[in-house]
Image (spheres, rainbow, N blue to C red):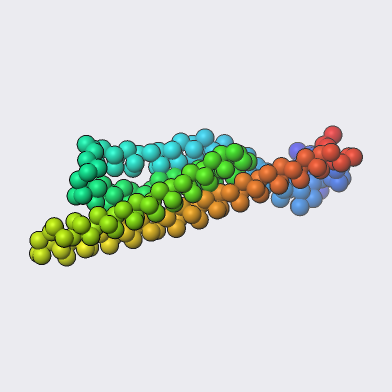
């Protein structure tokens, strides 16, 4: 630290700093850089948390639907309902992973997550169609006093399925655009470094 007139100034070799005095704008840039560095140190934990959020609910759903009986209408109907009810948390995990990848500049990870989100939207859409067909068949074989309960459960599962499709589509598009932004920023940084005097001394 260099002290002058009772004021503390930070020693810095940044071009434009006069005798070790940093302008406020430069100090703000350093603060932003420090914050970004701190966030980047949290990135591995973010990836781990995202993985746990994505995998754990799906594993739990898988244990609840085993053993598989795809020829049984009741099993298919119940299994799809369970899956639809567990999709929100894995999508939250995908979002967290995308945020971490964007902060770290992991373009390929963003593209992979975007593709996975789009694929999930397609798969869940197909699942919704099959769920509707199975709902009609299941409703025909249920006693009249049980229809109200079946309708409530079915509407909840359909709602969550539609929400999952929309959320997965939005995540897919956002992740793809974020990957393009990361690529553009990398290209701009490379161009600046290629300019005469652009590289730091």
Marker count (numbered): 0
* Residue 64 visible in the shown view: no
Residue 37 point in image, percent of width and height:
63, 39
- Could you tell me which residue is drawn at 32 percent across and 59 percent down? 158
- Rendered-image quadrant of the C terminus: top right
- Could you tell me which residue is drawn at 34 percent across and 51 percent down? 127
Question: Is 100 situated above or below 135?
Answer: above
Residue 43 point in image, percent of width and height:
54, 38
Residue 48 point in image, percent of width and height:
46, 36
- Rendered-image quadrant of the N terminus: top right
Question: Is 190 situated above or below 92?
Answer: above
**For this rendering, which residue is in front, 148 or 17?**
148
In this rendering, would 8 be left or right of 83? right
**For this rendering, which residue is in front, 72 or 113?**
72
Question: Is 111 situated above or below 201?
Answer: below
- Could you tell me which residue is drawn at 56 percent across and 39 percent down? 109
**For this rendering, which residue is in front, 193 or 71?**
71
Residue 3 point in image, percent of width and height:
79, 42
* Residue 57 visible in the shown view: yes
Residue 104 lies in what quarter of the image? top right
Residue 52 lies in what quarter of the image? top left
- Could you tell me which residue is drawn at 84 percent across and 45 percent down? 17
């Amino acid at each position: 630290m260099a002290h002058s007139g009772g004021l503390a100034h930070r020693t810095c070799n940044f071009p434009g700093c006069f005798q070790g005095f940093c302008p406020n704008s430069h100090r703000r840039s350093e603060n932003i850089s420090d914050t970004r560095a701190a966030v980047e140190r949290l990135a591995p934990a973010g990836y781990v948390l995202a993985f746990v959020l994505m995998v754990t609910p799906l594993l739990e759903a898988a244990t609840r639907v085993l053993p598989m009986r795809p020829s049984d209408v009741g099993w298919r109907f119940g299994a799809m309902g369970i899956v639809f009810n567990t999709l929100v948390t894995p999508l939250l995990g995908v979002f967290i992973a995308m945020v971490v990848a964007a902060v770290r500049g992991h373009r390929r990870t963003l593209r992979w997550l975007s593709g996975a989100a789009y694929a999930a939207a397609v798969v869940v859409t197909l699942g919704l169609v099959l769920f509707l067909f199975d709902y009609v068949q299941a409703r025909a074989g249920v006693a009249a006093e049980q229809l109200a309960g079946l309708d409530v459960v079915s509407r909840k599962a359909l709602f969550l399925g539609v929400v999952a499709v929309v959320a997965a589509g939005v995540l897919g598009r956002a992740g793809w655009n974020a990957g393009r932004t990361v690529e553009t920023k990398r290209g701009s940084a490379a161009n600046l470094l290629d300019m005469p005097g652009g590289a730091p001394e």
